[in-house]
Image: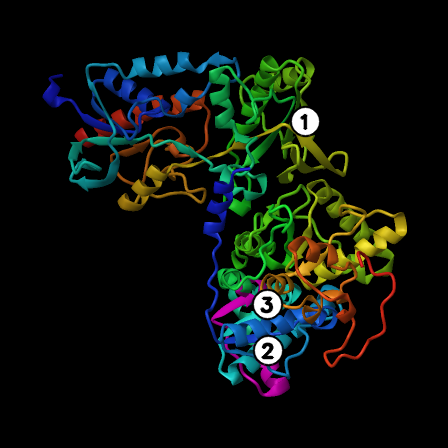
Amino acid sequence: MHKADKKRVVVIGGGAAGLEAAGQLARAGCIVTLLEKESETGGHVKNWYHLFPDIRNSDEVLKYLVRQADHGNITVRTGVTAGSLEKNGKSVIVKTSRGERIISDAVVLATGFDLFDSRRKEEYGYDIYHNVISSADLEVMFREGSVKRHDGEIPQRIGFVHCVGSRDSKVNNLYCSKLCCVTAVKQAMEIKKHIENARVYCFYMDMRMGGALYEELYKESQESYGIVYIRGKVSEVSDNIDSRLIVKVEDTLAGRPLRMELDMLVLMAGMEMSESGMRLAESSDLQTAENRFFAPADHHFGSNRSNMDGVFYAGTCTAPMNITDTISHARAVVADVTDYFRNINA
Amino acid sequence: MKSEGKKRIWAEYQKEIADDHYFYVRSCIRQSFFPGSEQFFLHFLGDVLGKDIYENPSHTTCTGIGYHADVVPLSTIMTVIARHYALMKDAGYRHIVISCVTSFGIYTEIFETWKHFPEELEKTREYLYKATGREFDLPESMTHTSDIIYKFRNEIADRAKYRLVNHETGEPLNIVEHIGCHYSKMFPKYGVGGAEFPNVLGGMIEAWGGNVIDYPERRHCCGFGFRQYLVQANRGYSLSNTTKKFSSMKPYKPDLVLTNCPGCTMFMDKWQYTIREMEGTVYGENGESIPVLTYEELAGLVMGYNPWDLGLQYHMVQSEPLLRKLGIEYDPADKFKTKDGRQMPLPQNLINA
């Protein structure tokens, strides 16, 4: 097929889903323009340290993804935001933040997710108390090889709060973010690797370990690392005169309230539809679901398809999912896109 | 602690506070136990700032205590509140100022109920009309008296005779701010600064030169809690809550507890006496208890009013340690004299006296 005959696809978002989808589409013969709003591709993966369930270094995954998009059919454009999509006959026109109009035969939205802003759960004191951090902040500490309190001390008593911004009607997020439980398990184990004598507590509602090898990791965290799991929601956090955190939580299994003094508290921030995705949904009449993520055309048969012909979804812009599922979803979108091209040419 | 984080939250919870033309509704507890507070409030707004503030003698209790004790049904209390709004409408006012935090919670709860269940509003209109022939409008603004003092905190600072600093050391006084639970915990948007880190009292303390203490049980109930207190058998629970709060704040060596709720002022004041009598525990320094004041009483002290005119002597914990730290001159002989100079009976067993 001559280059002029090849189909043009714009992939919006240069995270795990976007990079994988772009690579697979390019290998399928499409001419791909990948738009990334940040100055470099990689999305959230580049901020993480080790990945569950096999504690693989995230850099390995990142290198794989970047390699996927290193193809002659792919043009990567960073620092560019897609403003809106517009149908014009069989084409989809992407209007960018730079005022361009990119004409394509199909668009794949891989706009990903935003981490829940933990400041919205005011009772936990994120951005108020120095030693209340988010799961993303802890990954940065892991990457830097130094887990310390604000005063430079090594924390000895660390708590993890599950479901921060997930399964919480107060912040209008009724859904489960799926990854926070296993991330807390992984991070709790990592803490013990960094600080051998640390006491680590996980405050959870339910342990949702629904992925391959998650239960095994959970068991290992208890048997080999001594992580203590307390079933109950943290109600409030405060500082005492020694700058230790006072955490109130109900142990619902023991049926009694607890008041614990901790050196550090890690908030397991959930996933939300990205702001850039929401803007595109509004500007382009793309349907969103009750959870504000893009609504797939069909939950069973069309999770990559949108309500607009020629516009497809890949990855966490449709729902929280892990990297494995994100990559699978990104590969699946290629089948839908190529199927779409076959049908419009028929 | 990151003060910027608090400021960000405060910026999100700024409520509309009317500048003038207030319809004032009194508090049952405040006018009974520390009447100087309401007196100062009316004097400050009317005489000092020249604002138009009106109260109607036909105003009654909101019945909040009965409501929380399950003896007053919701439909009844809504009709009582509707009657207050009818009085306000008759007088030509649109901004209601509520002196009691329990009442303020009632007003906000009913306002939200009517918003979300408009059929309840219509039913209440019908009940009120059938019972009294009155009609009412919803208020344009709904503020607590502490909101108003917060709004004019800088005007008070401009008129200050004393700053909230120890006049001997020059150090800011350490002040615990205690916000009544019904001020913003039910509806954070109605409170200055929200529910988790309210700023309505902290803003006054800072404007007047003091240092706000944040301590682990800052958010905890004062011990009032209607069901803890109204049922005699539960009063040990009430005391245990107060003990928890004072034990938590003690390491910070507070010079003063400032509250915005009548019940909190009363219980944090009087239970200190009770705890001292029961187990000999005091929470201030030098064997003294910690004075517990209302924001008007503190504003009056800052502006140089005579502490006995403000009614500080009617608290169980006396304020002399605080007055000495502030360098406020007072005459002990005048403490229990009437305005025309007659000596009143001297109370026994006052703390800090």
Residue A332 seen in the current view:
no
Whether residues under marks 2 and 1 lie with C-beta atoms below 8 angstroms apart, the answer is no
Say if A294 sits above or below B316 in the image. above
* Residue A213 in the figure: left or right of residue B20: right
The reply to whether label 2 and label 1 mark residues of one chain is no
Question: Dot 1, how many residues are within 10 Å of its Cα: few (below 14), some (14-19), or many (20+)?
Answer: some
* Distance between the alpha carbons at the discs numbered 2 and 1: 52 Å
* Residue B32 in the figure: left or right of residue A310: right
Residue A327 seen in the current view:
yes
Question: Which quadrant of the figure contains the N terminus of chain A?
Answer: top left
Amino acid identity at mark 2 = His
Residue identifier under label 3: B107
Residue shown at 60%/21% (left/top)? A153
Q: Nearer the viewer, residue B188 or A317?
A: B188
Q: Is residue B141 magenta?
A: yes
Task: Point out which mark residue B84 bears.
Answer: 2
- Give the residues drawn in magenta, as a range: B125-148
Output the chain of dot 2: B
Output the chain of dot 1: A
* Residue B237 in the figure: left or right of residue A327: right
Residue identifier under label 1: A229
Residue shown at 48%/46% (left/top)? B7
